[in-house]
Image (tube, rainbow, N blue to C red):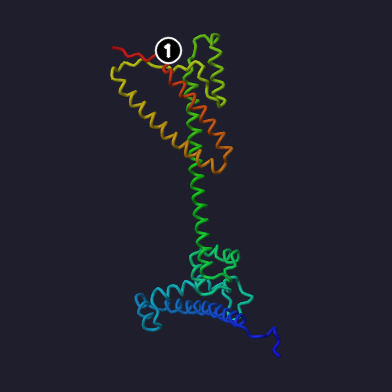
Amino acid sequence: MDNPATERTPLVIAAEIKMITCQTKKILLASAIEIGRHLQEAKAMLKHGEWIKWLEESVNYSRRTASRLIKLYEEYGPNFPEGPDSSNGTPVSHLTYTQALLLLGLPAEEREEFIAQNDVGGMTTKKLQQALQDRDQANQEKEQALQENQLLKKGLETIDSTISELKKEHAKALPRPTNPEHVNAEALSANDTFSAGDAPSATTAPFTHNLKTERNPDAYIKYAEKCNACCKTIADTFFDLTTALTNLAHIDPNLKEEKRKEANRLIEYMAETIKVWPPPKKPLRVNS
């Protein structure tokens, strides 16, 4: 009576066929790498223009097939064990011919790590293709995140620069009294608050620009154009601000809310100030 442990069954036979198929594919890769080595050697001996003709007449290979085989040798040959026994070889030695071709798309410095992390030797072609697609998608998402971070950084820098410029303009615009003893305490308080990072409230008396006497009767054209340019700058900066806040919301919601409140205080101050602008002191004069 046969020993049940060695009984031949369709499942046992199927497993043996799969093992032989896998071994055959690995032998095919080893053979392809060795052929690639010979092709590279022959190519180095041939004169310019003789390579394609030699391939067709001597080995019946197309240029594409030869290039692929040479590429296999260049990428895998140095790490591929010699001889039929590859049980103690590198991760590359456990690949099949098809797997090796699919992995040519990876940078050499990343390939062995990918093979080890994903157990490529035990994967079907379909699973390997999916793993490579997942890797490409992850790299694309990483690159997109880096781009968004750069955009966020640029947006935040724009906001900080705008706030800094507004603070400087506000500090310069405060009137300078001839008698320091009569400095308006409320105006100084407002200036100190704004310099600390908080926009003045709407109830604070608006600052006054030190306007020079304008002698050009057509000066309104210049100032109208200046208004248009400033409005465009504000609109562009506001777009950068909202873009930065959108990206920041995905990265750090708490920091986004902090920056949103800062921007909102500044916008509220600007909106309240523009309602009553210009202030009554030192108005623009146009001489006739």
Whether residue 83 appears in this view of the structure is no
Q: Quick check: 210 left or right of 12? A: left
The N terminus, quarter of image: bottom right
Residue kind at label 1, given as amino acid type? Pro
Name the spot of residue 143 as percent of width and height, x first: 50, 52
Q: Between 41 and 105, which is closer to the camera in this rendering?
A: 105
What residue is rendered at 43% in x and 21% in y? 274
| Image quadrant where residue 62 sits | bottom left
What residue is rendered at 63% in x and 85% in y? 8
In the image, residue 211 above or below residue 164: above
Whether residue 111 appears in this view of the structure is yes
Q: Between 248 and 6, which is closer to the camera in this rendering?
A: 6
Name the outermost residue toward the bottom.
1
What residue is rendered at 41% in x and 13% in y? 282
How many numbered marks appear?
A: 1
User: How packed is label 1: few (under 14 Cα within 10 Å), some, or many (20 or more)?
Assistant: few
Q: Between 100 and 1, which is closer to the camera in this rendering?
A: 1
Name the spot of residue 173 as percent of width and height, x first: 46, 19
Name the spot of residue 16 as percent of width and height, x first: 60, 81
Name the spot of residue 7 as percent of width and height, x first: 66, 85
| Image quadrant where residue 209 sits | top left
In the image, residue 227 above or below residue 14: above
Q: Element under label 1?
A: loop
What residue is rendered at 49% in x and 32% in y? 161
Q: Which residue is mark 1?
A: 280
The C terminus, quarter of image: top left
